Amino acid sequence: MLEKSGLRPVLLCGTVDPIRWSLKDTDGTIEQVKVLNAKWRALCGPPAGHPGHAP
């Protein structure tokens, strides 16, 4: 998905947001969400509206 130029995958980052969890979710589910969100941030940077987000 990443090109050799190092550009972010705009399609993914522009259409998919970090995942949210509910207080009803299990600890295991929340941990999985945190791992997936960390991968998303590594690929896409901070989400819009988050400190550190570049417009």
Image: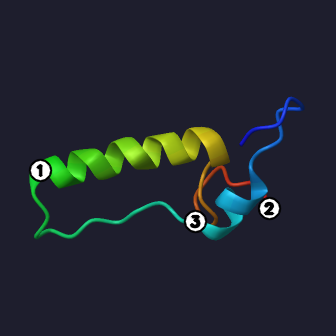
Separation of marks 2 and 3 at Cα, in angstroms: 16 Å
Between disc 2 and disc 3, whose residue precedes? Answer: 3
Quarter of the picture containing the N terminus is top right
Mark 1–mark 2 contact, CB under 8 Å?
Answer: no
- Tell me how the rendering is colored: rainbow
Residue shown at the point (33%, 47%) measured from the top left: 34
Three-letter amino acid code at disc 3? Val
Please state which of the two labelled residues, at mark 1 or mark 3, is closer to the viewer. Answer: 3
Residue shown at the point (14%, 68%) measured from the top left: 23
Q: Residues within 10 Å of mark 2 (few under 14, many from 20)?
A: few
Separation of marks 1 and 2 at Cα, in angstroms: 33 Å
**Nearest to the observer: residue 36 or residue 53:** 36
In the rendering, at what x and y percent does residue 30 appear? Answer: 22, 53
Which residue is labeled 2 in the image? 55
Which residue is labeled 3 in the image? 16
Q: Residue furthest right?
A: 5
Question: Relative to 1, is 53 above or below?
Answer: below
Separation of marks 1 and 3 at Cα, in angstroms: 23 Å
Q: Is residue 6 left or right of residue 26?
A: right
Q: Quadrant of residue 29?
A: bottom left
Between disc 1 and disc 3, whose residue precedes? Answer: 3
